[in-house]
Image (cartoon, rainbow, N blue to C red):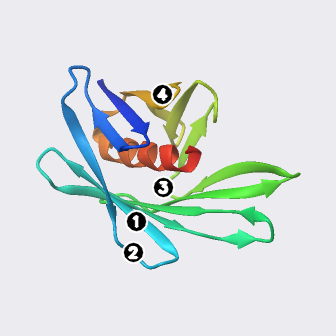
Amino acid sequence: MKELILDCHTSGVRLFNQTGDTCFTVTNDKALPTRQQWSIYDTSHRRIGTIKKIRNHFGLYHLPKFLVHVEGYQDVWVQKEMSELKSVFSMTGEAVAIEGWLSDTFKLLKGELPIADITKSKHTYKITVVEEKHLNLVVCLMVCLSLVLS
């Protein structure tokens, strides 16, 4: 198991380990005027994934759509939707799901198996990666979720 802390204050998104060493960096890349894009890099400066935000406006509602691309996995779409005048989020692609969505503790699942346990505290997430072979997927999805919820 590997433990990470994702800090998403206004100065940007940081991922570091228990000792405070930065494990992953997130950069805001230039994209089309209607899009935003972020790249996630590991400690050896190798890009492990990208997140693209596509803006959708439906009347009064702002319904963003995020595309998460991680090398070796199918793309994952995270989309904000309106259901009974409430905001809900859906995830499609790569058979990933969230158990306990928007609570203080939740799990990331791949198929039926948990790959990470997450505990939220204000602007930080404590991530315990259960399946380390899915570390890059967990990191990219958590960066995307922090962007969705900010």
Rounded to the nearest whole Å, what is the CA distance between mark 3 and mark 4?
A: 19 Å
Is 25 on the left or on the right of 141, as rendered?
A: left
Mark 1 vs 2: CB contact within 8 A: yes
Q: Which residue occupies 86% across, 52% down?
A: 85
Q: Give the Cα separation between the discs numbered 1 and 2.
A: 6 Å
Q: Which mark is residue 37?
A: 1
Would you name the residue on which mark 2 appears?
Answer: 31
Residue 118's tag is 4
Q: Marks 1 and 3: CB-CB under 8 Å?
A: no
Query: Sequence-wise, which precedes: disc 1 or disc 3?
Result: 1
Is 91 above or below relative to 23? Answer: below
Front tag of 2 and 4: 2
In the picture of the structure, the residue carrying the numbered disc 3 is: 94
At a point 73% along the width and 58% down the height, the residue shown is: 81
Locate the C terminus by quadrant.
top right
Identify the mark nearer the N-term, 2 or 4: 2
Image location of residue 14, percent across then percent down: 32, 39
In the rendered image, the vertical position of residue 20 relative to residue 148, given as above or below: above
